[in-house]
Image (cartoon, rainbow, N blue to C red):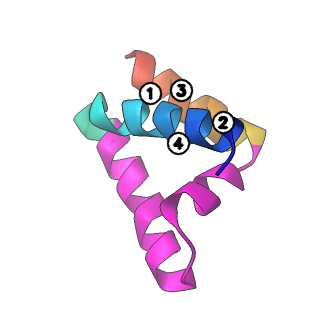
Amino acid sequence: MSQIERDFMRQVDELVLSASPELQAKLAEIDTAAQMSGRTFYDVYSSLSDEDKRQLIVLAKK
């Protein structure tokens, strides 16, 4: 695993660990999509559109 991949996973982990209840609900939707597709949470998160990622970041800052 490259350093970039580790950094990405650390950023996502920090987002998850500090998530508000509203953000947790959105992240749970991503997790469900990951489980249903057989992909990892990180893969599904990384494939989100820029707009979707911005919305998650806005929720994280609330």
Q: Looking at numbered disc 3 in the image, what kind of residue is underneath it?
A: Ile
Residue at 51 percent across and 71 percent down: it is 34
Which residue is under mark 3?
57
Which residue is under mark 1?
59
Which circle's residue, 4 or 2, is located before the other in the chain? Answer: 2
- Real-space CA distance between mark 4 and mark 1, rounded to the nearest whole angstrom: 19 Å
Q: Looking at numbered disc 2 in the image, what kind of residue is underneath it?
A: Gln
What's the magenta region? Answer: 23-49
Which dot, 3 or 4, sits closer to the camera? 4
- Real-space CA distance between mark 2 and mark 3, rounded to the nearest whole angstrom: 22 Å
Name the mark on residue 9. 4
Which residue is under mark 2?
3
Q: Is 18 left, or right, of 34 in this rendering?
A: left
- Real-space CA distance between mark 4 and mark 2, rounded to the nearest whole angstrom: 10 Å
Q: Looking at numbered disc 4 in the image, what kind of residue is underneath it?
A: Met
Q: 45 above or below 14? A: below
Q: 45 above or below 22? A: below
- Real-space CA distance between mark 3 and mark 4, rounded to the nearest whole angstrom: 15 Å
Q: 2 above or below 33? A: above
Which dot, 4 or 1, sits closer to the camera? 4
- Real-space CA distance between mark 1 and mark 3, rounded to the nearest whole angstrom: 5 Å
Callout 3 secondary element:
helix
